[in-house]
Image (spheres, coloured by chain):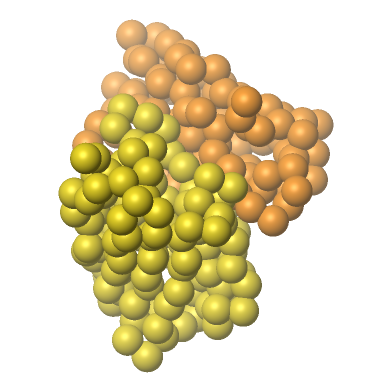
Chain colours: A orange, B yellow
């Protein structure tokens, strides 16, 4: 079983708000980073640290954490946000990194 | 502009070895940790290995520990992944990834386009 758990699929209506979650014991200690991956493209970092965005990532995208869970929230969801989203953090032992299984976001 | 160009991917038989390379440019290579991340066909992302800026710290996924070795040559601005005892489940697109810091973290702003490794008889 994966150390970080994500819902396999989430859908959202255009213009609405969606939250994608990532659960795992290591998230009580370590921050998660989030990556967006569109078909046939390399992943793109969208959130890192407590809630930091690399340059070029819109402020519609934000991150948060509480207890053993991290969340990625997208407000005013656009068609271009349709993608797979992956969380990553340290594993339970702390000496390796582990991805969640990914969440496929569909924009309706 | 940061550029990461992977090479070395190929079709290999199970049990054989392969060495991947990543040529880095557009930044001061020796200042940053680097990683290899892979993605099997139709599957999610998997962190494979990471190396700190000065090679003082290395880390591996459980699935590859003891079979794969990550290394770097700061003079040549290059990252490597030596893969031994390859298995069919190692079949994937392998990405070279630049970290944000000197030590291995999970914040990677720059990715290559990947090199394909296929393990099959």
Residue A52 in view = no
Residue at screen point 53% across, 69% down: B51
Most extreme residue toward the bottom is B75
- Judged from this view, the residue extending furthest toward the left is B11
Residue B31 appearing in the image: yes
On-image quarter of the N terminus of chain A:
top right
Residue B81 versus residue B33: which sits nearer the camera? Answer: B81
Q: Where is residue A63 in the image (x, y as percent from the top left)?
A: 60, 37
Q: Residue A10: x and y, percent?
A: 47, 14
Q: Quadrant of residue B95?
A: bottom left
Q: Residue at x 66, y 48 (%)?
A: A90
Q: Position of residue B92 (x, y in %)?
A: 31, 42
Give the vertical position of B121 relative to A73 (above or below): below
Q: Is residue A7 placed above or below A42 in the rendered structure?
A: above
Q: In which quarter of the image is residue A16?
A: top left
Left or right relative to A107: residue B67: right
Q: Is residue A62 left or right of residue B115?
A: right
Query: Residue A37 location, x and y as percent?
Result: 35, 36
Residue drawn at the location 81% of the way across and 31% of the way down: A67
Placement of the C terminus of chain A among the 4 image quadrants: top left
B91 and A88: which one is in front? B91
Q: Relative to A66, does residue A50 appear above or below in the rendering?
A: below
């Amino acid at each position: 079983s994966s150390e970080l758990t994500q819902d396999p699929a989430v859908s959202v209506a255009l213009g609405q708000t969606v939250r994608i979650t990532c659960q795992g014991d290591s998230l009580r200690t370590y921050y998660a980073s989030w990556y967006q991956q569109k078909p046939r493209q390399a992943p793109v970092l969208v959130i890192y640290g407590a809630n930091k965005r690399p340059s070029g990532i819109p402020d519609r995208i934000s991150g948060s954490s509480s207890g053993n869970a991290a969340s990625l929230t997208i407000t005013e969801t656009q068609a271009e946000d349709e993608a797979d989203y992956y969380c990553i953090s340290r594993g339970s032992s702390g000496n390796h990194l582990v991805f969640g299984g990914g969440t496929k976001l569909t924009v309706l | 502009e940061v550029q990461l160009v992977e090479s070395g991917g190929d079709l290999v038989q199970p049990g054989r070895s392969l060495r991947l390379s990543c040529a880095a440019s557009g930044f001061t290579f020796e200042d940053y940790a680097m990683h290899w991340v892979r993605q099997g066909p139709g599957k999610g992302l998997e962190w494979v290995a990471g190396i700190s800026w000065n090679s003082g710290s290395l880390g591996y996924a459980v699935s590859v520990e003891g079979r794969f070795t990550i290394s770097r040559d700061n003079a040549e601005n290059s990252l490597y992944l030596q893969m031994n005892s390859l298995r069919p489940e190692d079949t994937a697109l392998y990405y070279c990834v630049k970290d944000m810091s000197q030590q291995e973290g999970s914040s990677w702003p720059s990715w290559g386009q990947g090199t394909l490794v296929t393990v099959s008889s």
